[in-house]
């Protein structure tokens, strides 16, 4: 088993490589082994803390035929076959940051039902989550808002859009910019990922209808 040793400049430079085949080769050799090592570190304890068997999925980008991916990620879900149709945790890279998300993406078949649960407890959710948590409504973009910058009405509007707009998504978590030293220290980053997952587990459980 390989030990996760952090993310470094070469990993971010992957996204400056021209050409689909060339960039995919770099993703497969530089980044995917790190995702495997990080998953090996994170999965056993997350399975215990969540009370669910969790499985690692590493993005293959198999649908891409021309344009090289601008980001790549690993996902952790309570389903062995896939993750997109399930609430899941994500860790991934753009060219300038690492993201750690609890992700509810548009492929979820019960998106409206999950949004309804969140809307019923919107005030409590906002109060309990750390103020520095970020929100994104599209996993394909870097755009993210700080939860503390949204008032109650704006937070509820975001949840309503997630419920009502077919392509709308909801991702909650953290972004760490590439020059942050925590990224280069495997143990410290793993600890930050675990801390972030722990802070998001009550929301993950709520989405699945599990009582904490």
Image: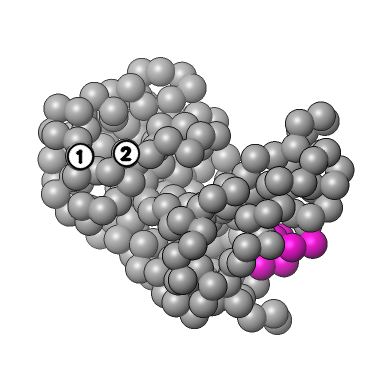
At 73% from the left edge and 41% from the top edge, which residue is drawn?
A: 61
Label 2: few (<14), some (14–19) or many (≥20) C-alpha neighbours in 10 Å: some
Query: Mostly what secondary structure, the magenta segment?
Result: helix
Give the image location of residue 184, x and y in percent: 54, 72
- Residue 107 falls inside the magenta stretch: no
Q: Quadrant of the N terminus?
A: bottom right
Name the quadrant containing residue 28.
bottom right
Range of residues picked out in magenta: 29-36
**Which disc, if any, is residue 149?**
1
The Cα atoms of the two marked residues, 2 and 1, are separated by 7 Å
In the figure, is residue 180 to the left or right of 85? Answer: left
Outermost residue to the right:
21
Q: Is residue 63 left or right of residue 143?
A: right
User: Does the magenta run of residues contain 32?
Assistant: yes
The residue shown at (85%, 47%) is 22
Q: Nearer the viewer, residue 64 or 211?
A: 64
Coordinates of residue 154 in the picture (x, y in percent): 20, 28
Q: Which sits in the foreground, 41 or 24? A: 24
């Amino acid at each position: 088993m390989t030990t996760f040793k952090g993310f470094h400049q070469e990993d971010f430079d992957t996204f400056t490589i021209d050409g689909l085949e060339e960039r995919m080769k770099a993703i497969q050799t530089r980044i995917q082994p790190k995702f495997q090592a990080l998953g090996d570190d994170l999965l056993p304890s997350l399975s215990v803390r969540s009370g669910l068997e969790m499985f690692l999925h590493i993005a293959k980008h198999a649908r891409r035929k021309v344009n090289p991916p601008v980001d790549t990620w690993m996902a952790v879900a309570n389903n062995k076959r896939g993750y997109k149709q399930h609430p899941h945790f994500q860790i991934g890279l753009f060219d300038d940051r690492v993201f750690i998300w609890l992700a509810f993406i548009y492929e979820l078949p019960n998106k409206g039902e999950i949004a309804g649960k969140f809307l019923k407890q919107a005030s409590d959710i906002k109060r309990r989550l750390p103020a520095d948590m970020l929100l994104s409504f599209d996993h394909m973009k870097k755009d993210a808002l700080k939860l503390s910058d949204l008032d109650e009405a704006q937070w509820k509007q975001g949840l309503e859009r997630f419920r009502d707009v077919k392509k709308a998504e909801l991702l909650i978590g953290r972004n760490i910019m590439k020059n942050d030293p925590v990224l280069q220290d495997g143990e410290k980053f793993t600890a930050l990922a675990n801390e972030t997952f722990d802070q998001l587990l009550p929301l993950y459980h709520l989405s699945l209808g599990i009582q904490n």
